[in-house]
Amino acid sequence: MCYVDGKIGADPDEVAELIESNIRRPSREEQDAQRATPRRLLTTRREALSLYREILRYSNLFVHRDEHGRMWRDVLRANARAEFEVARSEPDPELINRMIVTGRDAVQRIVDSYMRKRQRIIAEETERPQVPGM
């Protein structure tokens, strides 16, 4: 600060330094990272919800009962809900993405296995001779 002609003010160098120190523009890379972070979080959330809905849809295929008399559909839904609730508070996006990929892979393997078993049952039923009157 300087005192010139009865006025208090700052010379241009001090003003420029003050502006530089208080208003720092982020670099292009920092700006891109800031823009990508919310989008990535929304994408991860969207993917997790999509996986959860997919599990709920495919659970409708399992209408048989387990050894305790509960519908497998209900057991699968309860387990999926518990897994998602545990993972809800996970802060690491890399781990979340890994869980989503693992979950999608598990759903796909289960559905493929179910469909192969279903095709095998259908093939066995068509090979059996039809008994008249039944």
Image: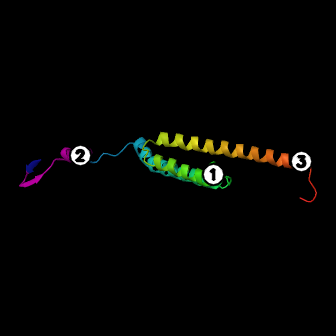
The amino acid type found where label 1 is placed reads: Trp
Which comes before the other along the chain, label 1 or label 2? 2
Distance from the alpha carbon under mark 3 to that under mark 2: 91 Å
Q: What residue is at 10 percent from the left and 53 percent from the top?
A: 8
Q: Which mark is residue 128?
A: 3
Q: CA distance from mark 1 to mark 2?
A: 70 Å
**Residue behind mark 1:** 72
Q: Left or right: where does residue 116 sit relative to residue 28?
A: right
- In-image side of 4 versus 58 (left or right): left
Image side of residue 32 versus residue 19, left or right: right
Q: Nearer the viewer, mark 3 or mark 2?
A: 3
- The residue labelled by disc 2 is 16
Q: Is residue 50 visible?
A: no
- From where the camera sits, is residue 42 visible? yes
**Image coords of residue 31 (percent x, y):** 41, 46
Cβ atoms under marks 3 and 2 closer than 8 Å: no
At horizontal 20% and vertical 48% (from top left) the residue drawn is 15
Label 3 or label 2, whichever comes before in sequence order: 2
Instruction: Please provide the residue range marked out in magenta.
Output: 4-21
